Amino acid sequence: MKKFRGACLLLVLLGAIPACSNVKAPVTARQGPDRQEVSVISSDSARQGSDSARHTVSKGETLYSIAWRYGHDYKSLAAWNRIKPPFTIYPGQVIKLLPARKSRALQPPPVADKQSRKPGRSAAATRETTPPKKTAAKPAAPAAGIRWQWPARGKLLKPSTLTAKKGINIGGRRGQKIVAAATGKVVYSGSGLRGYGNLIIIKHNDTYLSAYAHNRDLVVREGETVKGGQQISTMGVDGKGAPVLHFEIRKNGQPVDPLGQLPRT
């Protein structure tokens, strides 16, 4: 009986040896280097993100068309890149799309005014009892000194594209005459902006620009001064083949509802 028990115990011990060989080593010792590697990668990604806020100038582009593409004011782009009037740029030139970062000095937390709070009430409770003021968004006022007129005759179409959310679409017929909505200088005439087709941008003053997209023929060139009502192009078609003029007005680089500027007719 004792020999039988001893044989069984020996078999159990021999079976435990392979099981022990499958036990994996602990990985806690690798966690430190792994965390350091992750932090380095995230730091590199942050640097790449800041470097990506740049645009390399292509042939035919102007500072105005680049500002229009990214929704910036051309004056801001000029200041960020130290470009002086007449804002001449060259193919291959790198344009910064964001201002240079400025280091902010650490400031001490503001000191609470003891006299402005009643005893027994916290600052959070005081803030909760004061309702926030609501300011209603006001439509843009008509541009002073600019006499706007409709750039084309036709039916006002419902917005159907992403660019239409920034302006209006006027339906008409192919080859129809397109005129300048106001007096100004042509600062872009080309097809370099995706989604706009043949595009014309007119600068009316230091604040307002207007754009005319999906043209068939471009009648005016960059640098040319045009008067309100003067023909600048002919109507072309959009991406779906429908004859249309897409018209935008921007104030300091931001879209403005053209219906608030054009005469009611």
Image: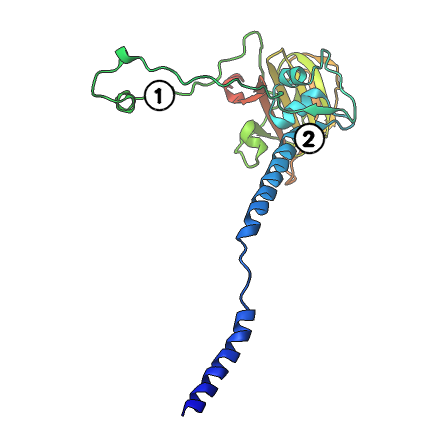
The residue closer to the viewer here, 14 or 62, is 14
Say whether residue 190 is left or right of residue 140. right
Q: Which residue is mark 1?
A: 134
Please tell me which residue is depicted at 61% across the width and 36% down the height of the picture: 43
Please tell me which residue is depicted at 56% across the width and 31% down the height of the picture: 164
The residue closer to the viewer here, 208 or 106, is 106
Say whether residue 29 is left or right of residue 114. right
Please tell me which residue is depicted at 49% across the width and 13% down the height of the picture: 141
The residue closer to the viewer here, 171 or 163, is 163
Rounded to the nearest angstrom, the CA distance separating label 2 from label 1 is 38 Å
Determine whether label 2 and label 1 are within 8 Å by CB: no
Q: Earlier in the sequence, mark 2 or mark 1?
A: 1
Rendered image: mark on residue 193: 2
Instruction: Measuring from the top left, give residue 70's x and y in whole percent.
Output: 62, 27
Label 2: state its secondary structure: loop
Vertical placement of 196 versus 136: above or below?
below
Instruction: Measuring from the top left, give residue 206's x and y in whole percent.
Output: 62, 11
Q: If the image is split into quadrants, where does the N terminus sit?
A: bottom left
How many numbered callouts?
2
* Colour scheme in use: rainbow
For the view shown, which residue lies furthest in the bottom direction? Answer: 1
The amino acid at mark 1 is: Lys
Vertical placement of 260 versus 38: above or below?
above
Please tell me which residue is depicted at 33% across the width and 15% down the height of the picture: 112
The amino acid at mark 2 is: Leu
